[in-house]
Amino acid sequence: MIHNTNNRVGGGNQRVIGLDYLRISLALLIFLFHSHVHVLHCDYGFLNGFVDMGAIAMTGFFLLSGYTLNLTNRKVENVGDIKKFYLKRLISILPLYYAWALVNIGQNILFDGMNAVVEELVLFPIEALGIQSVYATLFPFSHNGGSWFISCILICYFVYPLIQTLTKSLTDRARLRLILILGAILLWSPFVQHYFDLQTIYSNPFFRVCEFSIGILVSQMNVQTQTENKLILLLRKPLVCVLSVICLVAGVSIGYYIGIPHDYMLYSWVALPCFISLLVSLGYLNFKSSRVLQYLSNISFSIFLSQLIVVWYGVKFILGTIGCESNMAKIILSAVVCLGIANFFHYCIEKPSTKYLKAKFL
């Protein structure tokens, strides 16, 4: 997921570096997507079709979240374990979320005045509890176009102990069947939504929990070192990792240009299998770590939230002031500004608050 859970197998010292690469790649795709579809409309040439559908990265994030949580929290068996699990998750995500939300609320009030004040007061209890994603039509209001993700991930955290308890003793064959059932739901539901012109399921927590659950099941199958599962052994090969990336980019781009409706969830037909195969291969292959890699992985949550403030308008104002409108300048300055805000959020809010709260309560 965007929010880092350390990728440490069984909570030990072995860090799964491949998952850091996947997390950073997904965060980069979201950045490209936002810079392309929002105010700046950055041009990425032949990749524009793929970047325009970059929100499919959220499917990868929910799969990755379930996968990494299973790695680090395999035993959530009693009330004490569950309380500790919930507390750790809330400490790691809520301080930054609340700080970011306050910035957005202040921004809304500054630009919209009294109407925004009334709106924010009405929404406050829902957003404070993180349950805004159950209201699909709240997406355009306040900061819910971005915080729907946080709401969905909090709901995923809430149901994790139940999912883990129900699935930990399953056979791999039973897990595969369950993955196929959940996958079928995720593939068919966008078609139903599109056919009947229903409200979007993009921010619907039920479907995101389905992706999250698949991530857990895949992790349970892939952590077995001496597995005899032929499918898992096949997907662990480096070539599969490369082919998955090629298929993802090509499949989404071709679908975009031949006119498949630009509904992100409709592209699960290619995103879901490709991200699953990437989880298996990157979750098993050995990669070399570096300080830069760990740094980018650690601030990935902050990078995501930083894009949802006024980055694009600020960059447009700066470039307009200095009289520069080149595409490369838009991309580079956007990345610099976003990274700067992300560092502020991470080092001034996320890291110290997490350290303090863990020392106090854990």
Image (cartoon, helix red, strand yellow):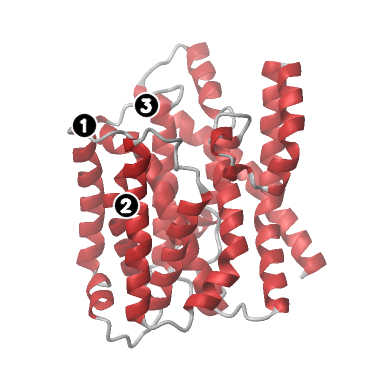
Q: Nearer the viewer, residue 157 or 277?
A: 157
Cβ atoms under marks 3 and 1 closer than 8 Å: no
Q: Nearer the viewer, mark 2 or mark 3?
A: 2
Q: Amino acid at mark 2?
A: Leu
Q: Where is the C terminus found, in terms of image quarters? A: bottom right
- Residue 57, given in percent of the width and then of the height, sits at 40, 47
Along the polypeptide, which appears first: circle 2 or circle 3?
3
Q: Is residue 203 above or below residue 112?
A: below
Q: Residue at 49% x, 57% y: name it.
A: 209
Residue 341's quadrant in the figure? Answer: top right
Give the numbered dot on residue 187. 2
Q: Is residue 92 above or below residue 219?
A: above
In this rendering, position of residue 91 left or right of residue 215: right
User: Residue at label 1?
Assistant: 259
Q: Amino acid at mark 1?
A: Gly
Q: Nearer the viewer, residue 335 or 250?
A: 250
Along the polypeptide, which appears first: circle 2 or circle 1?
2
Element assignment for label 3: loop
Residue furthest right in the image: 360
**Residue 314 at least partly seen:** yes
Q: Nearer the viewer, mark 3 or mark 1?
A: 1
Element assignment for label 1: loop
Residue furthest front in the image: 196
- Residue 324, given in percent of the width and then of the height, sits at 42, 15
- Residue 299, given in percent of the width and then of the height, sits at 56, 51
Q: Residue at 72% x, 71% y: name it.
A: 83
Element assignment for label 2: helix
What distance separates the C-alpha of mark 3 from that of mark 1?
22 Å
What distance separates the C-alpha of mark 2 from that of mark 3?
30 Å
User: Residue at label 3?
Assistant: 42
